[in-house]
Amino acid sequence: MRRRGVVLTAALTVLLALTACTVSAPATRRPSHSARPSATHTPRALPTATATPTTVGFDKSAHSVDDPNSIWVVVNKARPLNPIDYAPPTLVYPDVTYVNRQPMRPEVADALVAMFRAGKTEAGLDFSVQSAYRSFESQTHVYDDDVARHGQAFADTDTARPGHSEHQTGLAVDISAVPAKCSLDACFGTTQQGEWLSANSWRFGFILRYTQTTVPITGFTYEPWHFRYVGIPLSTELHTEKVQTLEEFFGVPGGTEYH
């Protein structure tokens, strides 16, 4: 027993010596990720045709769906803007062709210029802005005119009441073809411009907001000319997951009745 104890003691001594050498050896460090330039300091560039890859566990809380300043705000018949007479703090006029010269938010303008440029380069197509931002007062005039012409029941399927319109957020753009064809009409969806936009707008952060099959959810009739800016990450996620409406994606109320 004593001899075995001597052997074990010697072995333990060697092991402790090796451990001490390992501990004292300097560790090799990898470069810290914090040394990379912060994304917040990168100047904003025009959106490109390459969409942001979809990631597992998309963060639906990255932007508010209630704040009218958020690019993800969801406004419909059940969800009025708050405040109801909201106006975007900054509006610009991008260098594009207009039918009605109306401004839009800067991020929308950048994306729209890139999208129109791609449509021209890739398919030889030209576009114009039919309408963009409309104030609470302007939307009141549009809605009242529709009611006067067609009655309130029809108007409520066709035109948003003031405070319930995406145009009031500065994030929505009505697009028409150049030369004009089927402007603000369902047949725009069958034009070359309408088909190209339907297939490619997501690449630039836009979604076709009011489709033929989503009327019970969005509350509005098919408008193949109405595109809503939500940013490339969300438009890519919606495209990849084949989700057509913001209401379904975020699980918020919609429908055909005003609340």
Image (spheres, rainbow, N blue to C red):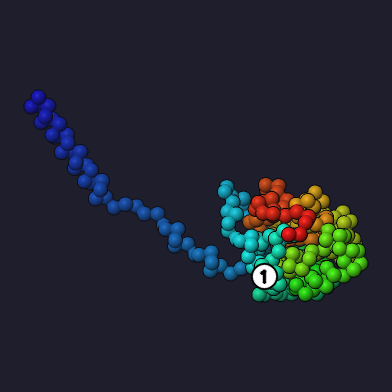
Quarter-wise, where is residue 101 in the image? bottom right
Q: Looking at the image, which is closer to me, 92 or 193? A: 92
Can you say whether 106 is above or below 234 in the image?
below
Can you say whether 173 is above or below 89 in the image?
above
The percent position of residue 128, horizontal first and vertical second, equals 82, 67
Q: Which residue lies furthest to the top in this view?
A: 1
Q: Which residue is identified by label 1?
A: 83
**Residue for point 58% across, 53% down:** 59
Quarter-wise, where is residue 187 in the image? bottom right
Res. 196 visible in picture? no
How dense is the environment of label 1, judged by Cα within 10 Å: few (below 14), some, or many (20 and up)? Answer: few
The percent position of residue 133, horizontal first and vertical second, equals 75, 70
The percent position of residue 125, horizontal first and vertical second, equals 83, 61
Q: Looking at the image, which is closer to me, 138 or 123? A: 138
Quarter the N terminus occupies: top left
**Residue for point 53% across, 64% down:** 39
Quarter the C terminus occupies: bottom right
**Residue for point 71% across, 64% down:** 80
Quarter-wise, where is residue 246 in the image? bottom right
Q: Which residue lies furthest to the front in this view?
A: 259
User: For this view, does 49 lie left or right of residue 183?
Assistant: left
Can you say whether 8 is above or below 108 in the image?
above
The percent position of residue 90, horizontal first and vertical second, equals 67, 75
Q: Which residue lies furthest to the left in this view?
A: 2
